[in-house]
Image (spheres, helix red, strand yellow):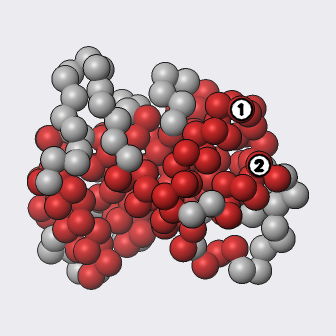
Amino acid sequence: MRTRRSIPLLCMAACVMGLGCGEKERPPDDPGVEAVLRSGAGDNRQTIQAFVKERGLEGLKKLLEKDSSRARIVALTGLGMLRGSREATELLLKHANGQDTEEAYWSIIALAYQGAPEAKDLIQKFMQSEEARLREGACVAIQEYRDETLYPLLDAALSDPNPAVQGVAQMMKQIIRDGQAVKHPKGD
């Protein structure tokens, strides 16, 4: 049985809250979405989980249709919490392979968190991307996916030409090294 841990999701939540993309956007007209977007980093994981529990896949699909990129990122994060949902995985794959770099970033992390088998190939693909943001997402996804065969990609990312990618790789290696990433047995 896999043990979930909250540190990486809290990091993701802090990133969601720190996005500058919401300044010019119309605020969501949904109190549930507003609660997720306004919650602090420490409360964000629980708020997203509560939203997923209350509204499920259908609620997340509605969030994906919003004009607010922050709302869509919350939806993508929530989809990652739906382990075993083929439809959630397909939606994440669609956004991971889409044109929006930020949505692709959050989708690869959510796929890895979900444990989707497709995440491994996408992580390798994203590590080769010309987009630094996608390489950053792949680094976070490696830590979330917890497949030791991908760890050498983090080592390689320490020499990435982009300092932001190097920093994320170093942070993810530290999380793994500190034991915050729990290795799970095969077949889980």
The residue located at (72%, 80%) in the rendering is: 23
Q: Nearer the viewer, residue 148 or 34?
A: 34
The residue located at (21%, 56%) in the rendering is: 175
The residue located at (51%, 36%) in the rendering is: 81
Q: How many marks?
A: 2
User: With 145 as the anchor, is 17 left or right in this view?
Assistant: right
* Residue ID for mark 2: 32
- Marks 2/1 in contact by CB < 8 Å: the verdict is yes
Mark-to-mark CA distance, 2 and 1: 10 Å
Q: Is tag 2's residue or tag 1's residue first in the polypeptide sequence?
A: 2
Residue 80 spot, x, y in % from top left = 51, 39
Q: Nearer the viewer, residue 61 or 42?
A: 42
Q: Secondary structure at mark 1?
A: helix
Few, some or many residues within 10 Å of mark 1 (<14, 14–19, 20+): few
Label at residue 70: none
Q: Secondary structure at mark 2?
A: helix
Label at residue 54: 1
Q: Quadrant of the C terminus?
A: top left
Q: Is residue 11 above or below residue 2?
A: below
Residue 157 spot, x, y in % from top left = 20, 66
The amino acid type, in three-letter code, at marker 2 is: Gly
Q: Quadrant of the N terminus?
A: top left
The amino acid type, in three-letter code, at marker 1 is: Glu
User: With 139 as the anchor, is 155 left or right in this view?
Assistant: left
Asked whether residue 122 is in view, the answer is no
Q: Is residue 151 above or below residue 167?
A: above
Few, some or many residues within 10 Å of mark 2 (<14, 14–19, 20+): some
The residue located at (22%, 38%) in the rendering is: 182
